[in-house]
Image: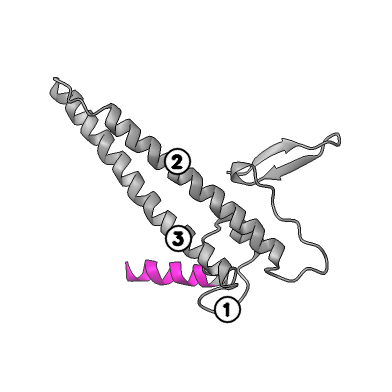
């Protein structure tokens, strides 16, 4: 996920988020979810969205390219399984795109970054790790515990 790039000073490293976006560095007097933070997360979400859309275009191209049915039955089975895997991946990405759109809408409404359960701050680092997060870590943990108990 995060990658490391060498900084300009000897021995210094700068952490990068996915797609080359630097982690947000807030100022001492900055309020939570300032305009600069909204801008930062909108950039991350739009970069992620564009990458997913490009991946969808690539998948469609791949499926069209390999539309010819192989003569060998085992090759046909392999091809069908490959198609099914690509389509499942696209379905998951489609759901993620919807979450990205919802997160961008929350930014537009100035509601992004706050837990939907308790209203507390989700936190900059958690949002950088999962920009579509809608629960703070405590509420997410409780949600996962409840889910495991339900089976």
Q: Nearer the viewer, residue 149 or 136?
A: 136
Residue 75 sits in quarter: top left
Give the residue at mark 1: 119
Residue 52 visible, this angle: yes
Q: Is residue 109 above or below residue 125?
A: below
At 48% from the left and 58% from the top, the residue drawn is 100
Report the residue marked by disc 3. Answer: 99
- Image spot of residue 89 (x, y percent): 35, 45
Residue 74 is inside the magenta segment: no
Q: Secondary structure at mark 1?
A: loop
Left or right of 81 in this view: 115: right
* C-alpha span from label 3 to label 1: 19 Å
In this image, 86 relative to 26: left or right? left
Q: How is the image coloured?
A: one colour
Q: Is residue 124 above or below residue 72?
A: below
Q: Earlier in the sequence, mark 3 or mark 2?
A: 2
Give the quarter of the image for residue 137. Answer: bottom right
Picture coordinates of residue 136 (x, y %)? 56, 69
Q: Which residues are magenta?
A: 139-151
Q: Nearer the viewer, mark 3 or mark 2?
A: 2
User: Do the residues under discs 1 and 2 have CB atoms within 8 angstroms?
Assistant: no
Measured from the top left, where is residue 90 in percent x and y? 35, 46
- Marks 3/2: CA distance? 17 Å
* Residue at position x 14%, y 20% in the image: 72
Quadrant where the N terminus is found in the figure: top right
- Can you name the residue that lies furthest to the top here? 71
Q: Are marks 3 and 2 in contact (CB under 8 Å)?
A: no
Disc 2: which residue: 54
**Main secondary structure along the magenta-highlighted residues:** helix
């Amino acid at each position: 996920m995060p990658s490391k790039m060498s900084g300009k000073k000897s021995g210094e490293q700068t952490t990068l988020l996915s797609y080359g976006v630097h982690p947000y560095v807030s100022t001492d007097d900055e309020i939570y979810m300032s305009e600069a933070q909204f801008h930062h997360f909108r950039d991350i979400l739009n970069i992620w969205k564009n990458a997913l859309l490009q991946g969808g275009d690539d998948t469609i191209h791949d499926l069209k390219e390999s539309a010819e049915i192989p003569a060998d039955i085992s090759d046909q089975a392999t091809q069908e399984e490959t198609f099914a895997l690509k389509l499942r991946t696209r379905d998951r990405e489609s759901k993620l795109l919807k979450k990205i759109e919802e997160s961008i809408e929350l930014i537009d409404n100035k509601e992004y970054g706050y837990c939907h359960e308790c209203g507390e701050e989700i936190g900059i680092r958690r949002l950088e790790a999962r920009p579509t997060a809608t629960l703070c870590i405590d509420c997410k943990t409780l949600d996962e515990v409840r889910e495991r108990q339900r089976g």
